[in-house]
Amino acid sequence: MAVWQFAFYLIKKENVNLFDESKPWGEGKNEELLAWHINEIKQESIQKIAEILPIEKSWSNDIKQYGKIDETCIEISLDDMAKYCIRVRLDMRSLSRELLRKIICFIQSNNADIVYCFENKCYQADEETLLRLIKNSNAYKFCEDPVGFLTSLDNLDNVTH
């Protein structure tokens, strides 16, 4: 993932209450809660996304990628259990409010919320919530002031070592 991308996963609303925010990412069953069966993803919503984020060749044959990997894209990946996982990457360099709204429509039409892995928390998929998360993200901070952001990382590194 590029430093200018804000990324999150989609989780079915019915699984939100099962998501354990106290477990670190990669431990427990949280990742299993991100699984979708293909018939749970509305085909009409995929067609609408494909109109604004055309299908691109992915690095993996198991991922259907809508949009360019280093820009705004939606990745639908197939795991070993024939289940799908949906990851969204928003390009902070070029994200428009119109594109954000269309992605929110995709999320809501699939009756989903978001899991922001950086915080390991679930959030409602609405414009206000996403804008708040974006504005507090490292991707947004990097795009606002790349030199300042990288300098702050360097300063943090000097404090911790």
Image (tube, rainbow, N blue to C red):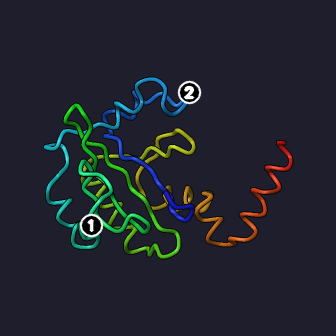
Position in image of residue 113 (x %, y %): 38, 46
Residue type at numbered disc 1: Glu
Vertical side of 8 occupied by 19: above or below: above
Q: Nearer the viewer, mark 2 or mark 1?
A: 1
Q: CA distance from mark 2 to mark 1?
A: 36 Å
- Residue drawn where x is 40% and y is 30% of the image: 17
Q: Nearer the viewer, residue 13 or 151?
A: 151
Position in image of residue 106 (x %, y %): 28, 59
Q: Residues within 10 Å of mark 2 (few under 14, many from 20)?
A: few
State the image quarter where residue 101 is shown: bottom left
Q: Nearer the viewer, residue 97 or 56?
A: 56
State the image quarter where residue 24 is shown: top right
Q: Nearer the viewer, residue 123 or 75?
A: 75
Q: Kindly identify which residue carries mark 2.
A: 22
Q: Kindly identify which residue carries mark 1.
A: 56
Position in image of residue 46 (x %, y %): 20, 59
Specify which label sits upstream in the sequence, 2 or 1: 2
Q: Left or right: 67 with respect to 122?
A: left
Q: Left or right: 47 with respect to 9?
A: left
Residue type at numbered disc 2: Ser
